[in-house]
Image: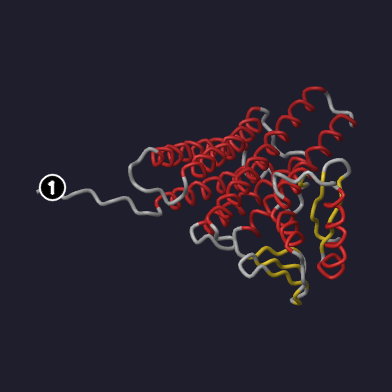
Amino acid sequence: MTAEASPKPPDKEFQLLEEMAATIHEAARTLKSAIDGATPSDEAWQKIRDLEHKGDAIARDLFEGLVSPNALAVETDALKALTGYLDDVLDAIEAAAARLAIHKVRRAIPTVREMGEIVLESTQELTVVIAQLRRMQDVFPHTRTLHRLENRGDDVLRDGIEALFSGRRNAKDIIKWKDILELLEGSTDRCEDIANVLETLLIRSGAEDKLVAGHLALDTGRHEVTVDHKPVPLSGKEFELLHLLLRHQGKVVRRERLLHEVWGEDYFGDTRTLDTHVGWLRKKVEDKGGIRLVSVRGIGYRLDLSE
């Protein structure tokens, strides 16, 4: 009698996601070596192309899981988004490596080397956060790091393009380096997209526990906020407002979203209510919390770490 096939392990998707993240990180290390001139660009490109093919195979396995009758370890929409964005990161790394090889780059300009380091750090965070996803714990610290790295990538891209056009480089060099910079920065954008998907998944699963920034900690389970390990009494609206800003640390949250999610979709009161509550929060958490609630004129608010 033919033995029946063993059922798919319930966490097969986690294994594949972890393997995909490891493949991306290996590609980023190889790319960084080429950018720094330690590995010939054509040799690095060939290795990254092989890794990209491996990533495609993993992505196919993940997508096939979406139509499998077996239960998925990760909800369908999240798995689809994660697979697509991970594949995009690897594609961007491969495309950047291709440009280095085509242009026979031996050593990149400083801004490209800096961007390569950001990409490498981002992929390292990916490997860690995807591994944490299996346990649904300690995810937010790594997703916030991905957000910060994407912000750094934006700054480096802007400064790099400005330097290219303000210098004496010829048109060919400007086009070459701008293209490479944009590809590398695009990979950090997709890493941030992955962070957004993971945060949403965590919140929907109810696994979110504690958010920390500076000396400030917010415990969702206990509905408690502490500053320097000392409890800080907040009203319900202040707690929800701080919670939303902490979830998007370093990013602007629009006034409309803050009002909608904290006060409800039927709220039609004065928007100055939001400013008043932010003012109260500042008095309670900024001084010793090591954070700042920054007003972005005409848009909303952002929570930053103090300098």
Residue 125, horizontal then vertical, whole percent: 62, 54
Q: Secondary structure at mark 1?
A: loop
* Any part of residue 99 in sight: yes
Check the image and report above or below for 115 versus 144: above
Nearer to us in this view, 243 or 169: 243
Residue at (74% x, 76% y) in the render: 229
**Residue 152 visible in the shown view:** no
Residue 12 percent across, percent down from the top left: 39, 51
Which quadrant holds the C terminus? Answer: bottom right
Q: Give the amino acid at mark 1.
A: Thr
Residue 22 shown left or right of residue 142 in the figure: left
Picture coordinates of residue 132, whole percent (x, y): 54, 59
Tag 1 residue: 2
The part of the image, by quadrant, that contains residue 87 is: top right
Which is nearer the eye, 196 or 235? Answer: 235
Of 106 and 216, nearer the camera is 216
Q: Is residue 21 above or below residue 184?
A: below
**Number of other residues with Cα within 10 Å of mark 1, as a class: few under 14, some 14 to 19, many 20 or more:** few
Q: Quadrant of residue 100?
A: top right
Q: Nearer the viewer, residue 203 or 256?
A: 256
Q: Residue furthest bottom?
A: 230
User: What color scheme is it?
Assistant: secondary structure
